[in-house]
Amino acid sequence: MHQNKLFNLMRLRLAAWYAVVIGFLMLLFGFSMYQIMAQVHWHALDQELETVAGILHDGLEPDLTKPGQIVSEVQEFLPGLCMANIDCSSTVVPSQRHILGLFQQEGYYLRLLDLSGATLATLGNQPQGLPISAKPLWQTIANSQGDRYHQISMPLQATNSPFWGYVQVGRSLRDFDEHLIMIKRFLLASPVVLLLVTIVSWWMAGLAMRPVYRSYNQIQQFTADVAHELRTPLAAAQTTVESVLQMPHLSESEVRLTLQTVERQNGRLSQIVQDLLMLARMDIQGLAQKRQLCCLNDLVNDVVEEMAALALVADVMLTDQVQTRQYLKVLGDEEQLYRVLTNLITNAIQHTPKNGNIVVALRHADHHALISVQDTGSGIAPEDLPRIFDRFYRVESDRSRSTGGSGLGLSIVQSIIQAHQGTIQVQSQLGNGSMFTVRLPLVRMS
Ligand code: ADP
């Protein structure tokens, strides 16, 4: 396949298509995964901040009196709260349980803002260099180092005033950003994966094209064989006509002889074309077209009776043995099944020397009929056995040519049997004869 330019090009194209399609699907999948993970993460983050802010909001509001004023109840509710303009860096914050413990973790912070948005008090790790504003409700902001923070600001109501200020809860987005960067890095590694996909695609394209290449070779071989087979009778007829045309005078017997030669070669040509047409038709149709009930007992008797004359001429004994009392019936094309038997018996007669024996037997086995044609002829060499059903294959071509065969007989037999959902097997020993066994499914009679 590597030497064939056309196939190499096709393989390249196929591999490129595989790589493009798989690569595109991978990128699409990766991008979707990235989006989904980012959204799920972001949603969880929002929920966390909203829950914490909501709990604090509800807990703080009953203790709020004057706008912007932080009373001792608020400080009790939020232990460790650091008032604005007081340095609380050395203050030891008692360890907190429940929701307030969150602000002892790195990256979480709380702010109480007055109505103008100025910081009144803070809790937790306050981010440096972050613009402070109470609006809008949700904010994602970054400091000069590029560290991002996400926060929620909820308005607080005092007991005797509509607004007290805001409670602002936020957290650093460092974990979140690191997580996304990790996924992005993984996605950026996709060129390496694409390269692997391309290599695998090339290999897969090779695998996919192997059977195509095999049948392409078979078709080429078949075309060459057909041309070769047709050339022989054509050349023989041409030579005969040419040599006769060069003769100054032709007697009637010479003309008759020439025409007989041309007719013989013509007959051979027609036979080859007919066989090829039949094989082509069977290749297209698959199953036998005409399907009728055929009684194999009658078929075997009829064929043996008709071939008896041919066997007599060849001086071989042809007998049939129907080894069953039942009538074995199959569904199929009687004409085609007739052809199977005549082909097998003709071959047997042609390859059996004088005084040899040919036995055509019919028997019944597991819902199948077995028809065997056994001869005491020349047999087939083990190296030829696997190839005798190939189109145009002939054992010792010279001898076969003298029988007038073109090597299509057994191919046709096999095609017919397959069209009847049967099988054909051969057992043979060089010098000891051959046995062809046809197995056909019987019609189930209810
Ligand atoms: P053809 O149409 O030329 O007879 P086939 O396809 O029928 O060719 O047979 C293929 C080859 O198998 C032939 O070359 C022949 O030598 C061999 N063959 C077929 N049947 C027998 C047999 N009964 N005994 C020995 N050789 C056989």
Image (cartoon, grey):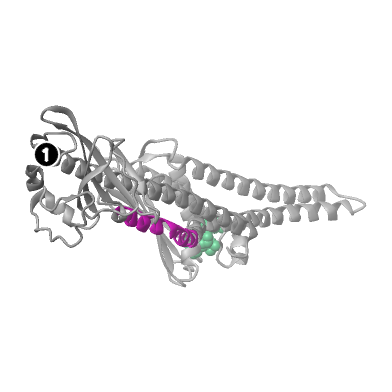
Circle 1: element type = helix
**123 left or right of 279 in image:** left
Q: Is residue 188 a member of the stretch shown in magenta? A: yes
Q: Residues within 10 Å of mark 1 (few under 14, many from 20)?
A: some
Residue 173 x/y as whole percent: 30, 52
Identity of the residue drawn at 67% across and 54% down: 227
Taken as a whole, is the magenta stretch helix, strand or loop? helix
**56 left or right of 202 in image:** left
Identity of the residue drawn at 14% across and 42% down: 70
Task: Residue at the far right: name it.
Answer: 248
Identity of the residue drawn at 60% across and 59% down: 8
Instruction: For residue 316, say whether it is visible.
Output: no
Q: Quadrant of the N terminus?
A: bottom right
Mark 1 and ligand 1: say if the CB distance to the nearest ligand atom is below 8 Å: no
Residue 256 x/y as whole percent: 78, 47
Q: Quadrant of the C terminus?
A: top left
Which residue is nearer to you in this view: 436 or 351?
A: 436
Residue 242 x/y as whole percent: 84, 53
Which residue is nearer to you in this view: 21 or 311?
A: 21
Q: Is residue 18 a member of the stretch shown in magenta? A: no
Tell me which corner region of the image, top left, top right, bottom left or bottom right, holds residue 327: top left
Identity of the residue drawn at 74% across and 56% down: 236
Q: Is 102 placed above or below 289 here? A: below
Instruction: For residue 280, say whether it is visible.
Output: yes
Tell me which corner region of the image, top left, top right, bottom left or bottom right, holds residue 66: top left
Q: Magenta region: which residues?
A: 176-200
Amino acid type of the residue tagged 1 in the rendering = Leu
Residue 136 x/y as whole percent: 31, 35
**252 left or right of 309 in image:** right
User: Circle 1 is placed at which residue position?
Assistant: 60
